[in-house]
Amino acid sequence: MLGATEMIARGTPPRRMTAKILLGQFCRREDGSLVIFGLMLFVLMLTFGGIAVDVMRYEQRRTALQQTIDRSVLAAASLTQDRDPTEVVNDYFVKAGLAPYLREVNVTEGLNYRVVDATAEAELPTFFMGMLGHSELDVPAHSAAEQRINNVEIAMVLDVSGSMGGAKIANLKTAAKEFVDTVKTNDAENRISITLVPYNAQVNLPRKLREKYNATNVHGVANINCLEIPDSAFSSTHLSRTLAMPMFSYADTSNTTSTSNSFSTTNSNMVENSIFCRNNNDNLVRLMSGNTTAIKSAIDGLDAAGNTSIVLGMKWAVALIDPAARPMTTELIADGLADASYAGRPFDWNDEDSMKVIIVMTDGEHVAHDKVNTAYKTGTSPIWKAGDGNYSIQHTANRPSAAGSNTYYVPHLSAWRSTPYTSGGTTQQTWQQVWSEKRVSWIAWQLYARALGTSNSTRTSWYNNTVNAMEDTYMSVSEMNSKLSQTCGLAKEKNVVVYGIAFEAPANGQQVIQDCATSEAYYFNATGLEIQTAFRAIASNISQLRLTQ
């Protein structure tokens, strides 16, 4: 190899000579291999750094998608929002600028639950991972949210009026019992309470429940505890326990009697089957029970008789699930009228973990009925009953001249006397005692019209005036329709879910029930065994109750 001097002598340029020298030295030195290794490491570091950038971009996009999808399904699944759940999810993605990546939204919902399941996916172009054969990355996101209401208060408002007799009430019992079985089957924690409110012209309460209210004119008939709810009470959902409410009299105000100008006992006795609040335990309100056997037994015992007052059944149902009734629940649990596990109920109207449901059914329409007026409900009457069963009455005014100074009229003798008729002894009667044996019409004719009237026209006048004084229409049909609409409206304002079942009902009955229901979807028009289908549809939305969020 030429030395530097020789290279110069031969005319080699200095720069070229220096490069050759340095190259030769480099080739002779062993530490050049470390430089190559360093270069390789540098390239690898750049590659992995680029991959890290791609991974960071992927994670940023995935996080944005996941957070958006999580928030959207939670909002959409909420039972307190009434927008379409799919639209709610879409809105979240639009506002986040991620709308192109939303792939699918599935919604499953029922009366007490809503499940929202959503999937999103984005394609992310890579910067460096393309060198490894991955020009883009799929960024998936999936989320599901579910809300189910755990605590449910159900009130079943069932028509037991006279027109429900025979096959109708048999079909109702079958359907209602199946409903109870369905909603309670998966209620292992006893979260579902059922209140049974049978109604005809009136609603009959258990005595201990009636005693929780300020009942006036208490007549003392053991199994009759119907109350006449004043007009003012229909302006709110609750029933005040201090509000004076007259008891409905145990009296026959519906049947007529013979009105010939002679004494007659034909059609004189009170007819128990016509009483609008009947003297038995068949149709009593049953409070907050989770005992399936007991509820179904009460349904089995329902008995059809009387007129139809849908408004009273609905009013009592709303009042008994009103949170204002909660203090009373504690007392009723102590009295054995409500399950101890339901302490603290009824829940607040806005309790997010509870639901209140009313099922109201009828086969008819509103029919007005009469009530005994306050002056004739209780207290001592001017009527006397003798030991042989005959009556007499004292009139201190308006006596005809034929009475002279005598003040007691004896209808079976058609005579006036100075003392009550006393064969076998005699006892002055309370109005309760009078009505428990005789019709209002018989008393008005035999003891008033025949005593004070002196001609056919005056007797008729006395009869009509007396009947009008003794009894009056509780509510007209138009008032009943109006108050039912008011009561249903108040319930729906409190987010009570109202199902309506018109069971072979006439047009007017169908209309008021449809108007009462939460919406068209909650209304059923059933015939025959279709009533089972209606109850099944309702039960399917209330089963498997729990809260999962």
Image: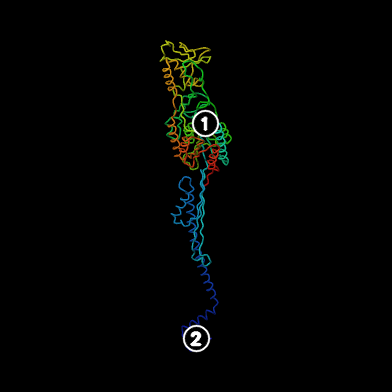
Which of the labelled discs sits on residue 17, or is there none? Answer: none
Give the mark, 1 or 2, whose residue is nearer the N terminus.
Answer: 2
Q: Is mark 1 on a helix, strand or loop?
A: helix
Q: Name the residue under label 2.
A: 4
Q: How crowded is mark 2: few (under 14 residues within 10 Å), some or many (20 or more)?
A: some
* Dot 1 amino acid type: Ser
Q: Name the residue under label 1.
A: 163
Whole-percent x, y for residue 170 in the image: 56, 33
Q: What element carries label 2?
A: helix
Residue at (54% x, 75% y) in the render? 33
Q: How crowded is mark 1: few (under 14 residues within 10 Å), some or many (20 or more)?
A: some
Whole-percent x, y for residue 61 in the image: 48, 58
Whole-percent x, y for residue 414 in the image: 47, 13
Outermost residue on the bottom side: it is 9
**In the picture shown, does residue 524 fall above or below 412?**
below
Q: Which of marks 1 and 2 is in front?
A: 1
Whole-angstrom CA distance, mark 1 to mark 2, is 131 Å
Residue at (54% x, 78% y) in the render? 29
* Dot 2 amino acid type: Ala
Q: Do the residues labelled 1 and 2 touch (CB within 8 Å)?
A: no
Q: Quadrant of residue 462?
A: top left
Outermost residue on the right side: it is 293
